[in-house]
Image (cartoon, rainbow, N blue to C red):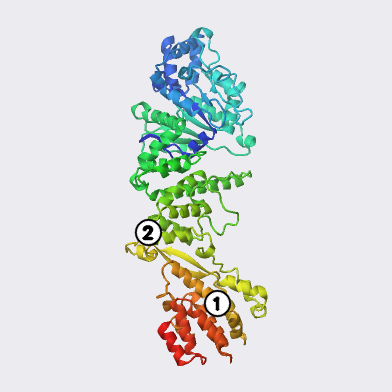
């Protein structure tokens, strides 16, 4: 939620967004003209009684709760004089400096979505808006009661003018019967002729309303909310309206919103110090921000982006998040400005942007539930900026598009590739079975190519994250291969079965949070194992359940002998993947820990799934080596010797030691030379 000035009211983010979408109408009451020297409604009544020489009730008299009745009584005793007094009081010329609030309200009411014009309603009679913008024309840019436009919000017949809902003051000699002042006037406007009631009811049904310059007990506000209650907006629009907003002066640290909410008003509380200066400054700054968005946002971002969110006032941090992620139709300008700030804004802002996504999603889910309860069409999905960067692999609805802010944030993210906080955040996504969006992967690869100084450990990590193949992506399918276990012995020789077996045994690399970093050890940028932990898994944990079914057959060893090529290839792939993350080389690999004994042995239990490949390879080898012709045995030993991992050298030594087809000299040569 933006706070446009220090200590000012927090303007709801939804209200700001709806104003940008031309769906808000500002209602202006007497409070906005008091800064220019005009009284509020009570002051107007008091002035009329004084000028007419009428006896006023005591200051605490109950009559003051019904100001319109007091004016009606005064008009009955002083016909003509009361309205002339009102006209004389309002016939003032205000200095330009005192029109700053009116100018700001005109800017806030200006339409943006391709519709020229201003949309604003005032229940004041004065001409201060016309003094603030003297080029307005009656019937085109403003309408005065009782002749009012139809408050529609569509492109073909959109209402675009200032509306004097209770009339516009004329010279004192004109009578000013059009002004809604007395209880009889209000009765005609809202009950008998009901032109104001129809306008207000249609307005509330079509727009979100923001009241400025009213109090809860203001008779004007009371008439308007009563008029709305008299017509069911649900029947007109197919949905219940949201609340109207009302700026409310309040000195309490814990103001009570319930009296307002009971009348479908959402209060925006502010401190009324120095003649409501905070409200006035908020509206002026809001208008400036809206009028020159790029300049205002640049000032905001450059002033706060370099600080940690936790070091800022919550409202200041919320303002920056809104500037980057919250403004509709922003086209990524705020995000682009953040990415261009030097030195680099801290990575902690990413969590704030992500939290904004979550809040937006929660609000949208609530709107969907409300729409379902009201039996209407669900609302359009809002834009998310951070979540689509790592879409879920379980989402079958297609790849999400990246919003303009998300795309503009990519350079900022890439500039943080050597930041452990970004690594940890990405690992969280990967552990949640998510994968970097193709545009993010492409941006990472471009940055790696253009930045040779990136340390080896971080470079390797980001090569994994940005890989296009599936070898560095969690492909596990715990239950997808379960059907292969049914009738496996009968199916095993089908041509397609080998492809399914290969698919189950396909290895892939995954990363997790670094245990070393989490335990407080220093991160070595040159070594990936201090940045993130990594391991190799197989696509299906059912692969060896299927293998166990095959092993129940009498000719199981023969079957695995026919698939030694596949098994050898998979084991080499496993070690190649470990080699990418620095855990396998010609001098070491994980088999020393994961496969204590090459030959089957009880101590091999409870190790990595892939290590059971040795069981199947050993069965196949036993069948091959049991043949009279030693040529095939020699061929497999020669092949395995070419694979320069200790896990294959151990396999060669164990196989030759158990074979009758190799001489002592041949075994010694392998032992000495590998």
Q: Determine the secondary structure under disc 2.
A: loop
Circle 2: is it few (<14), some (14-19), or many (20+) Cα within 10 Å?
some
Is 559 placed above or below 271 here?
Answer: below
Q: Position of residue 361 (x, y in %)?
A: 51, 48
Circle 1: is it few (<14), some (14-19), or many (20+) Cα within 10 Å?
many
Q: Does label 1 or label 2 sit earlier along the sequence? A: 2
Q: Which residue is mark 1?
A: 567
Q: Is residue 407 left or right of residue 418?
A: right
Q: Which residue is mark 2?
A: 455
Q: For the C terminus, give its image quadrant.
A: bottom left
Residue 355 versus residue 528: which sits nearer the camera?
528
Residue 502 versus residue 452: which sits nearer the camera?
452
Q: Is residue 503 left or right of residue 268?
A: right
Is 262 placed above or below 523 here?
Answer: above
Q: Position of residue 367 (x, y in %)?
A: 56, 45
Q: Position of residue 669 (x, y in %)?
A: 43, 87
Residue positioned 43% across, 72% down in the render: 584
Q: Determine the secondary structure under disc 1.
A: helix
Q: For the N terminus, give its image quadrant.
A: top left
Residue 226 versus residue 472: which sits nearer the camera?
472
**Which of the labelled discs sits on residue 60, or is there none?**
none
Is 111 placed above or below 356 here?
Answer: above
Residue situated furthest top in the rendering? 173
Is 202 placed above or below 479 here?
Answer: above
Q: Position of residue 187 (x, y in %)?
A: 57, 21
């Amino acid at each position: 939620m933006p706070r446009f000035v220090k200590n000012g009211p927090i303007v709801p983010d939804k209200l700001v967004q709806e104003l940008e979408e031309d769906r808000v109408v500002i209602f202006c009451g007497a409070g906005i003209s008091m800064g220019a020297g005009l009284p509020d409604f009570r002051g107007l009544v008091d002035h009329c009684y004084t000028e007419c020489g009428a006896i006023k009730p005591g200051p605490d008299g109950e009559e003051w709760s019904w100001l319109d009745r007091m004016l009606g009584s005064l008009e009955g005793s002083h016909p003509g004089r009361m309205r002339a007094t009102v006209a004389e009081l309002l016939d003032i010329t205000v200095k330009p400096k005192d029109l700053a609030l009116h100018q700001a309200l005109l800017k806030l009411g200006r339409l943006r979505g391709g519709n020229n014009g201003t949309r604003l309603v005032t229940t004041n009679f004065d001409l201060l808006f016309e003094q603030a913008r003297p080029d307005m024309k009656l019937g085109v840019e403003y309408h005065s009661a009782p002749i009012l436009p139809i408050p529609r919000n569509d492109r073909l017949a959109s209402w675009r003018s200032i509306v004097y809902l209770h009339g516009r003051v004329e010279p004192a000699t004109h009578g000013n019967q059009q002004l809604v002042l007395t209880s009889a006037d209000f009765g005609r406007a809202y009950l008998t002729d009901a032109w104001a009631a129809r306008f207000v009811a249609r307005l509330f049904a079509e727009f979100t309303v923001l009241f400025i310059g009213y109090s809860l007990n203001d008779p004007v506000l009371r008439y308007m909310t009563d008029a709305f209650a008299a017509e069911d907006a649900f029947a007109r629009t197919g949905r219940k309206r949201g609340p109207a907003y009302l700026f409310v002066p309040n000195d309490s640290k814990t103001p009570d919103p319930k009296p307002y909410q009971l009348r479908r008003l959402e209060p925006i509380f502010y401190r009324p110090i120095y003649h409501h200066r905070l409200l006035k400054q908020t509206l002026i700054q809001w208008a400036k921000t809206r009028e020159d968005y790029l300049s205002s946002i640049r000032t905001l971002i450059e002033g706060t982006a370099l600080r940690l969110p936790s070091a800022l006032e919550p409202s200041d941090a919320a303002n920056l998040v809104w500037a980057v992620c919250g403004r509709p139709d922003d086209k990524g300008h705020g995000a682009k400005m953040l990415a261009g700030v030097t030195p680099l804004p801290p990575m902690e802002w990413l969590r704030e942007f992500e939290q904004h996504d979550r809040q937006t999603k929660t609000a949208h889910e609530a709107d969907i539930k409300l729409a379902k309860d009201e039996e209407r069409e669900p609302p359009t999905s809002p834009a998310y900026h951070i979540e689509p960067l790592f879409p879920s692999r379980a989402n079958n609805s297609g790849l999400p598009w990246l919003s303009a802010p998300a795309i503009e944030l990519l350079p900022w993210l890439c500039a943080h590739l050597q930041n452990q906080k970004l690594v940890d955040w990405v690992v969280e996504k990967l552990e949640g079975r998510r994968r970097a969006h193709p545009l993010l992967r492409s941006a990472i690869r471009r940055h790696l190519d253009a930045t040779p100084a990136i340390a080896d450990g971080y470079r390797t990590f980001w090569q994994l994250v940005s890989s296009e193949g599936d070898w560095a992506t969690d492909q596990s399918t715990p239950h997808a291969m379960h059907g292969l276990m049914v009738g496996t012995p009968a199916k095993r020789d089908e041509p397609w079965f080998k492809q399914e077996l290969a698919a189950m045994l396909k290895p892939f690399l995954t990363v997790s949070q670094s245990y070393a970093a989490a335990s407080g050890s220093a991160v070595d940028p040159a070594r990936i194992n201090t940045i993130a932990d990594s391991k190799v898994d197989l696509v299906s944990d059912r692969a060896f359940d299927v293998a166990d079914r095959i092993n129940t057959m009498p000719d199981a060893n023969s079957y695995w002998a026919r698939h030694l090529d596949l098994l050898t290839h998979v084991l080499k792939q496993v070690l190649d993947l470990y080699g990418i993350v620095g855990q396998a080389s010609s001098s070491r690999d994980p088999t020393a820990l994961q496969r204590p004994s090459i030959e089957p042995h009880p101590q091999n239990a409870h190790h990595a799934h892939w290590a059971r490949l040795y069981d199947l390879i050993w069965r196949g080898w036993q069948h091959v080596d049991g043949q009279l012709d030693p040529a095939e045995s020699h061929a497999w030993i020669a092949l395995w010797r070419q694979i320069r991992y200790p896990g294959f050298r151990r396999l060669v030594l164990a196989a030759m030691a158990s074979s009758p087809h190799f001489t002592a000299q041949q075994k010694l040569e392998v032992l000495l030379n590998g």
